Image (cartoon, grey):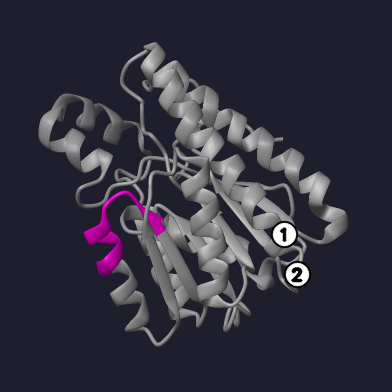
Amino acid sequence: MDLGLKGLNVLVTGGTKGIGRRAADMFAEEGANVSVCARNAEDVKNAVAALKAKGVTAFGQAIDVGSKQALEGWVNDSAKALGGVDIVVANVSALAAAEDTEASWQAQFDIDMMHTVRTVNASLPHLEKSKHPSIVIVSSVSGREIDFTSPAYGAFKAALIHYAHGLAHKLAPKLIRVNSVSPGNVYFKDGIWHYIEQNMPDLFKQALALNPTGRMATAEEIGKGIVFLASPASSFTMGTNLVIDGALTKGVQL
């Protein structure tokens, strides 16, 4: 199936590792031009080089996504470098999932919530010029069910789903599609579950046992969902929250 992504221009926040990196790779493999941002300059440099090697235009900047000015600068610089913006993937998370502290609440608000809002707002003038505008917001199953994570993590992941759904209705008349993706436990090298496996083996075993499939998702499995939802092949999908969790959660999504 042709996803219709060839020649489109894609922005991915947190696009140097894990889910974001795998999504960025797959967009490029489908022929889309890609811009990424992340905190680490070396990671950004390596990601951009790998994307360019796939034969597409690639761009990246090392920024603090908690900075409104930095995010807006990256979006606008990306639009210039790629020749426009068709797709935006808001993927970054503070991952303040361990402690119920004011610092955790602030981090989740600044990074998960406001980075998403600011990325969307900065991208809208560009998306309005696109023939295939699409936004995908990465949330979590922790936004659907109470689990072991901190209250702040789940609360803002739930807020992202609500924001995405509301935004979908608001932007539908402009034919700008908005959807969210809620991954379950995702395991990849140097990711949060890799860290937990190495440093908190009891928690890792407990979490793994909750997965009916006996394993966690891969970054590629989540990335595929993101890429499909973002693509013109999913042209009438709006306001959907795609849960990719291997039947981990038990709640019914109505």
Query: Where residue 63 appears, x then y in whole percent?
Result: 38, 50
**Residue in view at x 34 percent, y 71 percent:** 48
Cα distance, mark 2 to mark 1?
Answer: 7 Å
Q: Secondary structure at mark 2?
A: loop
User: Which residue is denoted by mark 1 in the rendering?
Assistant: 125
Count neighbours of disc 1 (C-alpha within 10 A) and say few if under 14, some if 14 to 19, many if 20 or more: few
The secondary structure type at the circle numbered 1 is helix
Q: Label 2: few (<14), some or many (≥20) within 10 Å? A: few
Q: Residue furthest top?
A: 101
Give the residue type at disc 2.
Lys
Compared to residue 26, the image places residue 203 above or below, namely: above
What residue is pinned by disc 2? 129
| Number of numbered labels in the structure image | 2
Disc number for residue 224? none
| Residue 6 placement: quadrant | bottom right
Most foreground residue, 151 or 225? 151
Q: Tell me whether the residue at label 2 lies in contact with that at label 1, contact meaning CB atoms closer than 8 angstroms.
A: yes
- Regarding residue 251, the answer to whether it shows in the image is no
Which amino acid lies under the numbered mark 1 shown in the image of this protein? Pro
Coordinates of residue 38 in the picture (x, y in percent): 35, 52
In the image, residue 152 sits, relative to residue 225, either above or below, namely above
Q: Which residues are magenta?
A: 37-46
Residue at (63, 32) in percent of width and height? 252
